[in-house]
Image (cartoon, grey):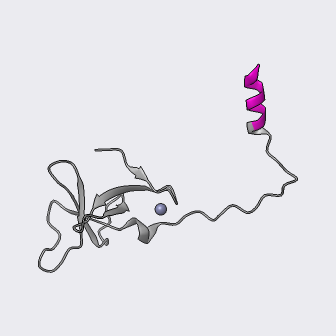
């Protein structure tokens, strides 16, 4: 099992898949029975995703996942800090290491 990737916006573990249209689609790492994307792994270890249809429903070797865009919740942007209060943490470390 390759290590998961992490969403750059919210940090959640995701899995990159290739859609039938050869596009990259990130899905949530954990399968979701209510998801709308069927994910499977081909013989080369590539994760593939597709939309199940009536003609081709989810196969036993596929798992339903939710596309990560549907669940991505980036944290609120940090409030602007007052410039009168500056953290000296990094500054001190740099100076100490110079000696
Ligand atoms: Zn995200």
Instruction: Say left or right for 48 vs 43.
Output: right
The quadrant in which the C terminus is found is top right
Q: Bounds of the magenta span? A: 91-99
Residue 89 x %, y % = 76, 38
Q: Quadrant of residue 90?
A: top right
Q: Residue at x 36, y 61 (%)?
A: 26
For the point 31% across and 71% down, the residue is: 35
Residue at x 23%, y 52% (from the top left corner): 46
Image position of 54 (left or right of 32): left
Q: Residue 1 location, x and y as percent? A: 28, 44
Vertical position of residue 99 compared to residue 85: above or below: above
- Report whether 46 appears left or right of 6: left
The answer to which quarter of the image holds residue 42 is: bottom left
The answer to whether residue 47 is above or below residue 1 is below
> Magenta span: helix, strand or loop, mainly?
helix
> In the image, is residue 93 part of the stretch drawn in magenta?
yes
Q: In the shown orientation, is residue 62 left or right of residue 82?
A: left
Q: Which residue is situated farthest in the top direction here?
A: 99
- The x and y percentages for residue 80 are 76, 61
């Amino acid at each position: 099992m390759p290590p998961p990737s992490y969403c750059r916006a919210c940090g959640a573990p995701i899995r990159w898949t290739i859609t039938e249209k050869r596009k990259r689609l990130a899905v949530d790492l954990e399968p979701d029975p209510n998801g709308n994307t069927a994910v499977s792994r081909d013989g080369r270890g590539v994760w593939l995703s597709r939309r199940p249809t009536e003609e081709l429903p989810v196969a036993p070797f596929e798992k339903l996942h939710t596309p990560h865009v549907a669940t991505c919740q980036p944290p609120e942007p940090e409030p602007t800090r007052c410039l009168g209060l500056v953290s000296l943490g990094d500054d001190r470390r740099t100076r100490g290491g110079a000696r």
